[in-house]
Image (spheres, helix red, strand yellow):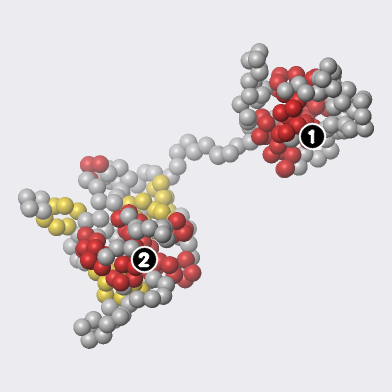
Amino acid sequence: MNGIHGHQRCLKTAPIKNVIVHIGIKPENMKNGKWIPISKGFINYLPKDREYTKLEAAYSLQVDYDCKNTVTVTGYSDLWQWSRKRVYNFLKQMNIKITYPENTTKKRNQRGFLGVHKGLHKRDIKGTYKEHIRLIENNHLEEERNIKGTKEGHKRDIKGSTTIEPKNLKPKNKDLCPHNEIIKLYHNILDELPSVREWTEPRKRKLRARWNSKIVTDDGTKINSLKYWENLFNYVKDSDFLMGRKTDFISDLEWIVTKSNFVKIREEKYNRRKE
């Protein structure tokens, strides 16, 4: 069947929220329930030039189920690059049925809605139960208790989806570069050079990149130490060229921390003997 199929319409017709993916695992191995919330934004990462894996196909089904998209077996066959038989078998494995508006023997080429067969278990040949990987009803999902019967670690967000409460979560990408201290050193040692009046974000990025470059000098001084920057500024102070004593050019802090210039300073290309 031609046209956009299933979850390809979901992001255009429904707000982005979490979709719940259920994983069939043994209860004794279950710590925080048998599902995890995954953003529907991952639809954009589903393959377009290869066949789907079972995990990707299951995610595709869950999104369509949650969005109440109309679907067809042929549509999934084309989208997943699977045979129709393989799609049928996977739907059976997932305990899923497609319900069509009218009897398919009388009217073909219909779009239907995904549904779940009653009964979530089947007996294997030994008479024990083997659980299906299945779809989760996400729209009215309530907090699940863990296997100890408690609700610790769970909280509901404003949309009603359930997430794990992070513990001891450290902020990412924290700026550890001491910009103000380095600027103070620059002013104290290189008071003849232009002063820093505004330390803009582009300038911060340059200094931060140099600070985080993990350079260590021959005497063991690390670049992410104020001692390193004190030595660097004293080197600049001894250079007639960088201090503007030789030509009309005069350096400043932004020029010093620009990568190409910084490398030349580290290589001592501006010392008195080589100028």
On the rendered structure, is 96 left or right of 164? left
Q: Nearer the viewer, residue 132 or 77?
A: 77
The percent position of residue 66, horizontal first and vertical second, equals 37, 65
Residue 36 horizontal/vertical position (percent): 36, 51
Q: Quadrant of the C terminus?
A: top right
Between 4 and 144, the one nearer to me in the picture:
4
Circle nearer the N terminus (1, 2): 2
- The percent position of residue 222, horizontal first and vertical second, equals 64, 21
Q: Which residue is drawn at 92% across and 25% down?
A: 245
Measuring from the top left, give residue 11's x and y in whole percent: 47, 66
Amino acid tagged 1: Trp
Residue 259 left/right relative to 85: right
Q: Seen in the image, is 102 located left or right of residue 3? A: left
Residue in front for this viewpoint, 269 or 216: 269
Which residue position holds label 1?
255
Residue with the mark numbered 2: 79
Q: Which residue lies furthest to the top in this view?
A: 219
Q: Quadrant of the N terminus?
A: bottom left
Rendered image quadrant of residue 104: bottom left
Vertical comparison of 267 with 18: above or below: above
Check the image and name the residue furthest to the bottom. Answer: 106
Q: In this view, does 53 lie above or below 146?
A: below
Give the CA separation, mark 1 to mark 2: 53 Å
Residue 220, above or below 145: above
Q: In which quarter of the image is residue 60?
A: bottom left
